[in-house]
Amino acid sequence: MNLISRLIGIHELMLLNFYPYLHKYLRPHQIDVTKILLCAAQATHEQVPPDIAATLIKEILDNFVTERNSPEGIAVGINAIREICSRCPLAMDSEYLDDLAQYKKFKNKNVTEAAKSIINLFREINPKMLKRRYKIRPTEAVKELNEKSLMEDEKANDSDGWIDVSHSEDEVYFDEEEGK
């Protein structure tokens, strides 16, 4: 399983039957379940269809990220989902993301850190999926930085790749015909 998942991830192979195969081993009481979750994360990449990766995320949510599970199991599940989403960001549904973000106020520190890490991931890759309360409020420095980058982009677009060269009438040009 480990070898196949590495090959899929490194070479971005499309073995769509591998993901449903993983589903039957994604149980909290399975022996070496963390290795199986690692295999699931390794086997995902940007070329995996989002619906296939979404079913994998749904399976992890149903089996690990529930109130009836131990805090360690919840943290492991959220971290596995974060790794899958970092490799295949289109797999996450905004409803699932909101459910995971609510674990930010959980009573266990490991679970809250895992929830914060998935919130931070989506702040970088797709902040529109996050609810307003989980988005970063821009500070004055960030606003100023954004204004500067917008101004630089506009300047770059105005030039269209042309460079302005100034000409002086005092310049001497070499004329090949006359040899001067």
Image (spheres, helix red, strand yellow):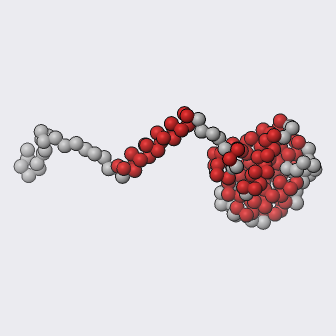
Residue 115 placement (x, y as % from top left)? 77, 43
At a point 93% along the width and 49% down the height, the residue shown is: 68
Residue 78 placement (x, y as % from top left)? 80, 47
Taking the view exactly as shown, the residue that stands out farthest to the top is: 141
Residue 11 placement (x, y as % from top left)? 66, 57
Which quarter of the rendering shows the C terminus? top left
Residue 169 placement (x, y as % from top left)? 13, 42
At a point 83% along the width and 62% down the height, the residue shown is: 21
At a point 64% along the width and 49% down the height, the residue shown is: 127
Taking the view exactly as shown, the residue that stands out farthest to the left is: 178
At a point 69% along the width and 49% down the height, the residue shown is: 130
Residue 12 visible in the displayed image: no
State how many labels appear.
Answer: 0
Residue 177 visible in the displayed image: yes
Say left or right for 171 vs 109.
left
67 or 135: nearer the eye?
135
| Location of residue 45 (image quadrant) | bottom right
Which quarter of the rendering shows the N terminus? bottom right
| Location of residue 90 (image quadrant) | bottom right
